[in-house]
Image (cartoon, coloured by chain):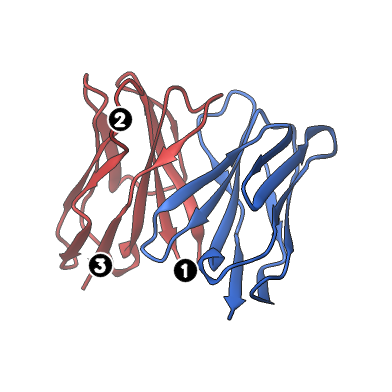
Chain colours: A red, B blue
Amino acid sequence: KAGVTQTPRYLIKTRGQQVTLSCSPISGHRSVSWYQQTPGQGLQFLFEYFSETQRNKGNFPGRFSGRQFSNSRSEMNVSTLELGDSALYLCASSSNVQNTEAFFGQGTRLTVV
Amino acid sequence: GIQVEQSPPDLILQEGANSTLRCNFSDSVNNLQWFHQNPWGQLINLFYIPSGTKQNGRLSATTVATERYSLLYISSSQTTDSGVYFCAVLYSSASKIIFGSGTRLSIRP
């Protein structure tokens, strides 16, 4: 079956703009979580959704938001982009992240200039 | 919050050598995974191993949950094994994966 699909793969944006990233989980998986990876901070948790409900949120400013649709696809949005938002954004798909194996997409590499 | 520590941070080996990567975690966990991050950034699943021992070809992993550590063994290393290896845990009723800082493995021909 198909893996986790993230779109777009690469993105270049200007400071102050906003961006929307998409994640389509493995068919049948209801949990989608998002992570930011930067050289200085490593892999950090952004938020997790299960059946359209946000169950947990990381320590990120309110400019970072997300949602999940009824088909389990998820989007994350970053408004008023800052240079420090440049990172690799990864999403994970699982049946239920609390107790099952998670699978990651290829990531979206965002560059803010 | 839970802490995940990986060691060593960097490891340089000759092709054919064996290696052991360690992951220590500070609290009881109900989910532990090992990943290999490829040069393009994707996290490749190696093992889902909350406890016990698993093997997959040249790779094997052991998690001793009661002592709060996991080990990843790579035997007969190949240059394609190079990259960053992450240990990731999830505990209790939390809904987030906590990653260690990774071990960067470099295999020289």
Residue drawn at the location 56% of the way across and 24% of the way down: A99
Image marks 3 and 2: residues in contact by CB distance under 8 Å: no
Mark 3 or 2, nearer chain start: 2
Label 3 and label 2 in one chain: yes
Which residue of the protein is positioned furthest toward the right in this rendering?
B67
Residue B1 visible from this viewpoint: no
Quarter of the figure with residue A109: bottom left
Q: Residues within 10 Å of mark 3 (few under 14, many from 20)?
A: some
Quarter of the figure with residue A27: top left
Judging by the rendered image, the residue that carries numbered circle 3 is A111
User: In the image, which disc is placed on residue A39?
Assistant: 1
Between B59 and B35, the one nearer to me in the picture: B59
Which amino acid does the dot numbered 2 rest on?
Lys
Residue at mark 3: chain: A
Residue drawn at the location 67% of the way across and 32% of the way down: B50
Please provide percent x and percent y for residue B85: 58, 58
Q: Residues within 10 Å of mark 1 (few under 14, many from 20)?
A: few
Q: CA distance from mark 3 to mark 2?
A: 31 Å
Q: Nearer the viewer, mark 2 or mark 1?
A: 2
Mark 2 or 1, nearer chain start: 2
Residue at mark 1: chain: A
Residue at mark 2: chain: A
Judged from the image, the secondary structure of the residue bearing numbered disc 2 is loop
Between A56 and B31, the one nearer to me in the picture: B31
